[in-house]
Image (cartoon, helix red, strand yellow):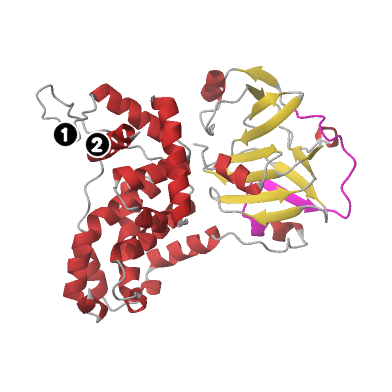
Amino acid sequence: MAELETALRQLGGELDFPQTPDLASAIRRRLERPAPLWRRPVAIVLAVLMVAAIAAVLAVPQSRSAILDWLGLRHVSVVRVEKLPVVPANGGLGLGHRITLDEAKRRAPWLLLPDGDPDSVWVNESIPGGKVSLVWGTPSHVRLLLTELSGRAYIEKIIDGGTEVERVKIGTAGAWFQGPHVVMFQDRDGRFHDTQARLARNTLVWQQGGVTLRLEGGLSKAEALRIARTAS
Amino acid sequence: MERARRGDEDAYEQLVREHQGIAFRTAYVIAGNASDAEEAAQEAFVKAYRALGRFRPGSPFRPWLLRIVANEARNRRRSAGRRAALSLRASAEETSGGAAPSPEGVVLAGEDRERLLEAVNGLREEERLVIACRFFLELSEEETAAALDVRLGTVKSRTSRALEHLRETYG
């Protein structure tokens, strides 16, 4: 037991950390400068980014555009309705056809992979840029579904009063959908098909670089975030 | 420390010099790249200076500082949307046959070192961080708790879980 710990300490001593910059001098210069931090553009940008990154549970604004602004997800639109339309709960996953993980990486170099290989990988070419789905479980009994779209594709989500939406700290923007909601993907002609709509479970949607990711399964928010944060 | 608290910039500069190494490396482990780490550590030292008035005299400076540093590093990692991939590379030089054994009598061969590092990098983020803090940066449990913003008990349980996982993969 102690051997592993010793080995780790030893490894620590042999790691190639970047050289520590001369922080002391830089800080001395900053402390001597009278201008307050907030007047500096860089600091302002950082402050804005940090404010944007603060997770906050807020009431979802009523208007569609307000929701979009609020979530900051550019490739996801959220529509609030009185009552969700009737759609199949599990039908129309629209996975497309099965390919190997290596093929998926070749076709979609932007693909982000979380820890742990999926049980199967699927691509649907009818979605602009291709929609890649990573499935854990079987297609008929999906335990976890991670759908990834390149920047050209759009997702539409329809929510009602029973759906809670919360902005979360992940990637450049993220949102957690708790409870049932309808999900649709836009096809190459720019249309959302009712026939492709299906009822989704708890879902985490986020954007990372130019990729929009959607993680669905019987997960809690914390579990979904934990998995999502391993995607790279 | 007392002089720094009274606003003596020379004294604070000295304090920064003493702690900049551990502050930068902690930020690097969390932020995952050198430029974010530098920015985070620098910002943290400036913030710490302005907050020195609230620092409790007599309490240890390092955990207090590392909490601020780690927080800055996390903010940068999150706002930039990057994964905190700790792409640590083992130093280029191989352990030569003639190298003196370490005091513990354990010398990791180059291959074992690679394998162990791979196992650490393959851990879940929270476990990788706790291993990096405790063993790579050699932070105390208290300092690790401050840096990772978790309770002391969590550091203990996470460390033993991470070690268990490492034993499974590293053997």
Indicate the position of residue A99 as horizontal and vertical percent values. 62, 18
Mark 2 highlights which residue?
A10
Indicate the position of residue B74 as horizontal and vertical percent values. 44, 54
Mark 1 highlights which residue?
B102
Q: Quadrant of the N terminus of chain B?
A: bottom left
SS for callout 2: helix
- Chain letter belonging to callout 1: B
Q: Are marks 2 and 1 in contact (CB under 8 Å)?
A: yes
On residue B81, the disc is none
| Residue at (54% x, 50% y) in the render | A172
Three-letter amino acid code at disc 2?
A: Gln
Report if residue B165 lies within the magenta region: no
SS for callout 1: loop
Q: Which residues are magenta?
A: A68-94
Task: Classify residue A126 by image quadrant.
Answer: top right
Q: CA distance from mark 2 to mark 1?
A: 8 Å
Indicate the position of residue A78 as horizontal and vertical percent values. 74, 50
Report if residue A82 lies within the magenta region: yes
- Chain letter belonging to callout 2: A
Task: Classify residue A203 by image quadrant.
Answer: top right
Q: Quadrant of the C terminus of chain B?
A: top left
Q: Is residue A87 left or right of residue A205?
A: right
| Residue at (65% x, 34% y) in the render | A147
